[in-house]
Structures are given as C-alpha cells and as structure tokens.
C-alpha cells in the first residue's frame, strides 16, 4: 500500500520542516512492514511538500502509527499534513481492487 502525506510549509520554515520530516520518515522506516519512502518538494510550488511511504499492507502502517517511537518522533509532524485521504492501494495488472464501502460506526 502507499501512503501520501502532503504539507503546505511557508518558505521561511522549510529547513526546520525538512529536518522534522526526515525524522518522521526515519521513525516510520524502523517499523515492521515498511517497504520504502521518499520526501519531496513540489517543483512548481516550493511550499508544497510530500512524504510518500510504501508498506507491505495496511496493518503494518496502522501498527507503525501506534508504535511509541513513531508517536514520539513522527506524529506531531504528520499531524500537520493537509487534511485529505492518504492511504492508497497499489494497482497492478491482475490485482483485485478493494471495494469501497462505508465503514460501520457501531
């Protein structure tokens, strides 16, 4: 699965944010199920940043968010992400796609 977190960061905070984002990625990378990730900055709008990570499955990602080290080193930075859906399933030839359905509140 893919997780894409986008951030809007004023230019005067770019360097400190970059360090925070690198720390967050390092914390996530230490978790079981992490398959890779990158940090990027938009070439047309330098205030727009992205943290893109790949996971073996959604469970690995959710467990990573629950880990003490991630809560300590990453959650504060991740909470600054633009509010939008961030988890994506990989779409490859021959794969069965997830069927969208409302989640039960009960």
Image (spheres, grey):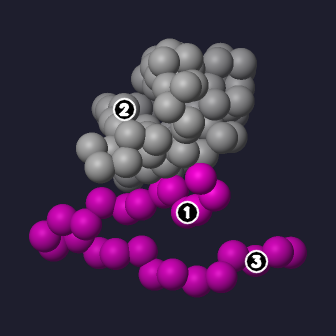
How far apart marks 2 and 3 lie (CA) works out to 34 Å
Q: Badges 2 and 1: C-beta atoms under 8 Å apart? A: no
In the image, residue 57 lies at what x, y percent?
Answer: 43, 48
Task: For marks 1 and 3, give the CA distance.
Answer: 18 Å
Q: Is residue 75 left or right of residue 37?
A: right
Specify the label residue 39 is tagged with: 2
Q: Which mark is residue 65?
A: none
Question: Circle 3 sits on which residue?
Answer: 104
Chain part drawn in magenta: 82-106
Residue at 41% from the left image edge and 60% from the top image edge:
88
Comes first in the chain, label 1 or label 3: 1
Q: Which residue is mark 1?
A: 85
Q: Residue at x 37, y 62 (%)?
A: 89
Q: Is residue 100 above or below residue 86?
A: below
Please tell me in which quadrant of the rendered image residue 69 appears.
Answer: top right
Q: Is residue 89 one of those drawn in magenta?
A: yes
Q: Residues within 10 Å of mark 1 (few under 14, many from 20)?
A: few
In the rendered view, tell whether residue 32 sits above or below residue 73.
below
Marked residue nearer the N-terminal end (2 or 1): 2
- 2 or 1: mark nearer the eye: 2
Q: For this rendering, which residue is in front, 96 or 10? A: 10
Say what secondary structure mark 1 lies in.
Answer: loop
Task: Write the residue at 57% across / 25% down.
Answer: 13
> Which sits in the foreground, 21 or 47?
47
Q: Nearer the viewer, residue 56 or 4?
A: 4
Give the Cα separation between the discs numbered 2 and 1: 18 Å
Indicate the secondary structure of the residue bearing disc 2: strand
Q: Quadrant of the C terminus?
A: bottom right
Q: Are marks 1 and 3 in contact (CB under 8 Å)?
A: no
On the image, which quarter does residue 104 sit in? bottom right
């Amino acid at each position: 699965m893919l997780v894409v977190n986008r951030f809007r960061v004023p230019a005067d905070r770019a360097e400190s944010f970059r360090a925070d984002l690198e720390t967050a990625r390092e914390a996530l990378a230490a978790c079981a199920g992490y398959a890779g990730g990158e940090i990027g900055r938009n070439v047309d709008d330098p205030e727009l940043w992205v943290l893109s990570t790949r996971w073996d499955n959604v469970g690995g990602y959710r467990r990573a968010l629950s880990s003490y080290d991630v809560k300590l080193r990453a959650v504060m930075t991740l909470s600054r992400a633009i509010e939008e859906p961030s988890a994506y399933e990989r779409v490859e030839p021959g794969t069965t796609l997830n069927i969208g359905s409302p989640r039960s509140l009960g």
